[in-house]
Image (cartoon, helix red, strand yellow):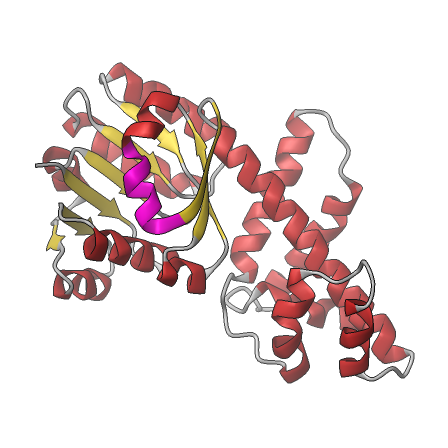
């Protein structure tokens, strides 16, 4: 019987793993440095692993969902010595594509396969199992594990070789960050011109400027309630990945550079843990 391992039970990983536990009939082993998070999944039927190494030793498919490139490197350094040929590793973290490609080569040397599979959308979609998932890596391996991915997301697309899923995620979040900044600047300009907030939102809906991030974040912005669906610190990480990728490719991205400055200011102001729409506070204060 296939055993699935899940490493990283944070804001997104917790709900992603919960869907696997609930929807599959597989043994699911879980590990996180936060033992309270592990206990939640064990209460749902998962089995607690004592370490990343135990996940590597026991599981056929190993999923990781951790914050940064350095975290993924640390996890894989612990997993690699334990791997038996034929294992499939799926890293769903959003990290530097070059780091992921390098790790995929190390995994291949062990006779195993690795996919990068970063996700889009936020916590509510993770709870519902309605994430978008971008895949980089061998298509045959992707087809083999696609049923597992579909327990977590309802829109899954294979983008190409290793690293391609991450490039797509970085492109996606670069666009999202710029759309949200456009929303923030539009609201700030309208408010300072004396227009009513609700009237502005309605008026935008009459034209081509209507967008998901205005419709989805209008309540948070109006009430100043920036409860996190996707954090400032995570978007700051992603926009920096985008700018860095542009630099590697010798592409100028002036919009992304501007948004990068906004997010860096938000981090410096202590807004890291708030929802990324909280960057309107930076726009309003400038």
Name the one closer to the observer, 17 or 272.
Answer: 17
Q: Is residue 278 visible?
A: no
Above or below for 107 versus 33: above
Q: Residue at x 22, y 53 (%)?
A: 23
Q: Residue at x 60, y 48 (%)?
A: 173
Q: Please identify the quarter of the rendering in which residue 42 is found.
A: bottom left
Left or right: 138 in relation to 26: right
User: Is residue 62 found inside the magenta-colored segment of the image?
Assistant: no
Question: Which quadrant, please, contains the C terminus?
Answer: bottom right
Looking at this view, name the residue that lies furthest to the front: 206
Left or right: 14 in relation to 139: left
Q: Please identify the quarter of the rendering in which residue 10 is found.
A: bottom left
User: Magenta span covers which residues?
Assistant: 145-153
Above or below for 188 versus 78: below
In x, y percent, where is residue 214? 69, 67
Q: Is residue 139 visible?
A: yes
Q: Residue at x 22, y 35 (%)?
A: 61
In x, y percent, where is residue 114? 33, 27
Q: Residue at x 12, y 54 (%)?
A: 48
Q: Main secondary structure of the magenta part?
A: helix
In x, y percent, where is residue 152? 34, 50
């Amino acid at each position: 019987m296939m055993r699935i391992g899940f490493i990283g039970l944070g804001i997104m990983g917790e709900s992603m793993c919960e869907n696997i536990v609930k929807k599959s009939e597989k043994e699911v082993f879980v590990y996180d440095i936060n033992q309270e998070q592990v206990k939640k999944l064990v209460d749902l039927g998962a089995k607690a692993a004592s370490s990343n190494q135990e996940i590597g030793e026991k599981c056929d498919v190993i999923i990781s969902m951790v914050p940064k490139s350095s975290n993924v490197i640390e996890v894989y350094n612990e997993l690699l010595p334990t791997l038996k040929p034929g294992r499939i590793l799926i890293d769903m973290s959003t990290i530097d594509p070059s780091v992921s490609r390098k790790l995929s080569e190390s995994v291949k040397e062990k006779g195993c396969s690795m996919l990068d599979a970063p996700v889009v959308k936020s916590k509510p979609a993770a709870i519902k199992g309605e994430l978008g998932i971008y895949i980089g890596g061998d298509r045959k391996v992707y087809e083999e594990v696609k049923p597992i991915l579909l327990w977590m997301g309802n829109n899954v697309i294979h983008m190409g070789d290793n690293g391609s899923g991450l490039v797509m995620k970085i492109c996606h979040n670069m666009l999202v960050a710029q759309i949200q900044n456009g929303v923030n600047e539009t609201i700030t300009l309208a408010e300072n011109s004396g227009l009513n907030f609700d009237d502005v939102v309605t008026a935008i809906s009459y034209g081509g400027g209507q967008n998901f991030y205005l419709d989805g974040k209008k309540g948070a912005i109006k009430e100043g309630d920036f409860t996190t669906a996707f954090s400032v610190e995570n978007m700051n990480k992603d926009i920096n990945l985008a700018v860095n990728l542009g630099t590697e490719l010798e592409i100028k991205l002036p919009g992304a550079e501007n948004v990068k400055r906004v997010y860096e200011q938000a981090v410096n102001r202590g807004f890291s843990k708030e929802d990324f729409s909280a960057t309107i506070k930076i726009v309003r204060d400038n």
